[in-house]
Amino acid sequence: MKLNSKKLRTISPEKALRMSKKIKRADIYLVLENVLDTYNVGGFFRLADAIGAKKIYLCGATGTPPDVKIKRSSVGTYKFILWEHKNTVREAMEELKKIKNMKIVAIEQSRASVDYRRFAYQTPLTFVLGNETYGLEKKTQKSVDAVVEIPMYGINKSLNVMIAAGVVMYYALSEIKK
């Protein structure tokens, strides 16, 4: 069953919770580190729902529902995606690393990054994304299994964090489902 934006916005949290238990989710998780734009956070809920992710960890200064901007930009999907706030990414990653064979992949530009199309994606899988201006903290980048990035061909250094996440996650999903 697919719900339009009006139904997503108006469905009760209780009904959303009951419905979400019936949705088959992939072993994919998102970890957001200090993502400050609440519209981006809401967009991550939409993306997590779209790819069938199991959970979002909102870490550090990342905003959380019921912030009105998150509610608005998520178009109600925040009611369907399991989420949790952690003070640090480290706390979230310690929990995720308990899942057998978990691969934790940062989407970030760095000297250690590889083209996102050259990484061998498999589940269980966690994507870690950072602040819109500063990216991921260096200690976070060092603690992941891999760092992938999207090649930039113009003068602009990077894409919006949400757009970059969408590109990489849909590509990864298509590779996993092959």
Image (cartoon, rainbow, N blue to C red):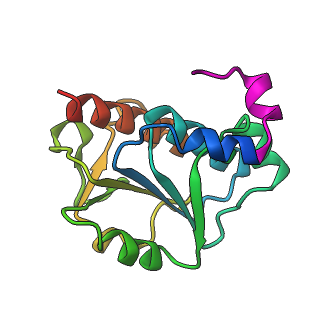
Between 61 and 92, the residue placed more toward the observer is 92
Give the magenta-colored segment's residue range: 1-13
Q: Is residue 68 magenta?
A: no
In the image, 130: left or right of 58?
Answer: left
Q: Is residue 69 above or below residue 134?
A: above
Q: Quadrant of residue 12?
A: top right
Give the quadrant of residue 5: top right
Q: How far from the left and from the top, in percent, is residue 37?
A: 69, 52
Asked whether residue 10 is drawn in magenta, I would say yes
Return the x and y of residue 18 as percentages of the image width and height.
Answer: 63, 44
- Look at the picture and state if 136 lies above or below 47: below
Q: Residue at x 48, y 60 (%)?
A: 135
Between residue 9 and residue 92, name the one nearer to us.
9
Residue at 52 percent across and 56 percent down: it is 56
| x 23%, y 30%: residue | 177
Image quarter where the C terminus lies is: top left
The percent coordinates of residue 23 (x first, y second) are: 49, 37
Which of the 4 image quarters holds residue 136? Answer: bottom left
Name the residue at 68% across, 46% down: 79
Q: Split into 4 quadrants, where in the image is the N terminus?
A: top right
User: Where 174 falls versus 146 (above or below)?
Assistant: above
Can residue 135 be seen here? The reply is yes
Give the image location of residue 82, x and y in percent: 57, 54
**Residue 160 visible to the viewer:** no
Q: Is residue 110 left or right of residue 48?
A: left
